[in-house]
Image (cartoon, rainbow, N blue to C red):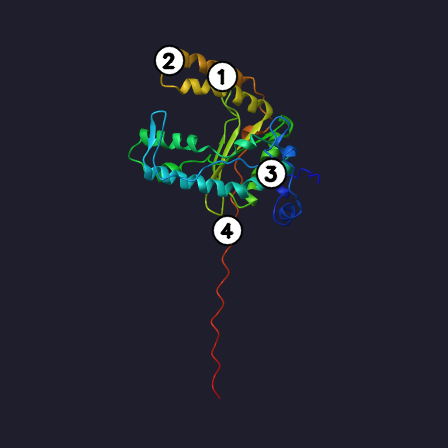
Amino acid sequence: MTFNRLPARALTGAAFALVLGAAPAQGAAALAGPELPLPVEEPQFHQPPGGGGWEKGGLRLDAEDNRAVDAFLDEAEQAEKHLSPQLRTVASWSGAELVGFDQRLKTPDSLKRKVATWLEEDPSQSVHQALGDINDSVRYTLRWSDGEYTEGVRTASVMLADFGHESVRWSNTWKNRDSYKAVNSAWREPMAGHRFEVQFHTEAGHRAAVETHPLYEEQRLPGTSPERVAELREQQGRIFAAVPVPDGAERLTAPRSRPAVPAPAPLPAPVPARAG
C-alpha cells in the first residue's frame, strides 16, 4: 500500500483510526532507507539477569541495583514490541526515513554504565530515581529532507500524541548557530508508562551529528586537556554551522496533550419494586 502524507491537522479521530486499521505491515527496507535496512530477524537484546552485580570500566552496580536495571531493560523490551510498529506507521505517513532502527534498544552495558555513572556522581539518589530519568532505553530517529522537515515533524508528533503518548521532553535546538541542530523529544507510552526517545533530524543535521559524535566523546574524556577540548569544540562548531535551517524549524513545538476522556457517570441504583 502507498501512504500519502497528510497535514498534521488531519490526523485526528476517524482519520487516524483508518491508519491503524488499513495500514499493513511494511517491509523493513521500505522504511529504514537503503543504507540502514531493518534487520530481518530480531536480535537478542538482553539476557535474563544472573542475580549478581555488574562491573565494567571501573564502574559497578551491586546485586540489588543490577537487578533493578535488568527489570527496567525487560520493561523496555516489552514497550518496544508495540512502539516499533507505531513508529513505522508514523514514518510512512509523515514521509520520514526511520534510520538506525537496529539500535532502537539501548544495550544492557550502555544503560548500566549510564546508571552507575549517575549513582557515582550523586550517591544520595537511588537506582530507581536514576532510572526515572532515563528517556532513551528505547529510541528512534526520523529523518526528512529540508523541504519536508517542518511539516513532517508536525505530522509525526501529532500522530505520536494520537497514539496516546504523552510528551515529557521537547528540545528544539534549531536556533543554535554552531552546535547540535535537531528536535529531540521524549514520550511516555500509555501502557506501562515507559519513556522513549524520538529524534527529528534533517539529512544534513543527522550527518553532522554522526560526524561530530567521536569528537564529542573525546571531549568528555577526563584526560582530555583544556586546549584539546577547545579545539574539539571549534571543530564541532564548524560542522554544525554548515547545517541549513529549514523554514519554520526553530518554531516547532510539542503537540498539545490529548484531553482526558471523562469517566462515564455511574448508573443509578435500581429502585426496588413495591410489594402488593
Q: Which mark is residue 88?
A: 3
Along the polypeptide, which appears first: circle 2 or circle 3?
A: 3
The residue tagged 1 is 237
The residue tagged 2 is 226
- What is the secondary structure assignment of the residue under circle 3? helix
Along the polypeptide, which appears first: circle 3 or circle 4?
A: 3
Q: Are marks 2 and 3 in contact (CB under 8 Å)?
A: no
Along the polypeptide, which appears first: circle 2 or circle 4?
A: 2
Mark 3 to mark 4 CA distance (whole Å)? 26 Å
Q: From the image, state whether disc 3 or disc 4 is nearer to you.
A: 3
Q: Are marks 3 and 4 in contact (CB under 8 Å)?
A: no
Where residue 10 appears, as percent x and y from the top left, is 64, 43
Along the polypeptide, which appears first: circle 2 or circle 1?
A: 2
Q: Which residue sits at x=36%, y=25%?
A: 57
Along the polypeptide, which appears first: circle 1 or circle 3?
A: 3
Amino acid type of the residue that numbered disc 2 sits on in the rendered structure:
Pro
252 to 259, vertically: above or below = above
Mark 2 to mark 3 CA distance (whole Å)? 43 Å
Q: Residues within 10 Å of mark 4 (few under 14, many from 20)?
A: few
Where residue 60 appears, as percent x and y from the top left, is 33, 30
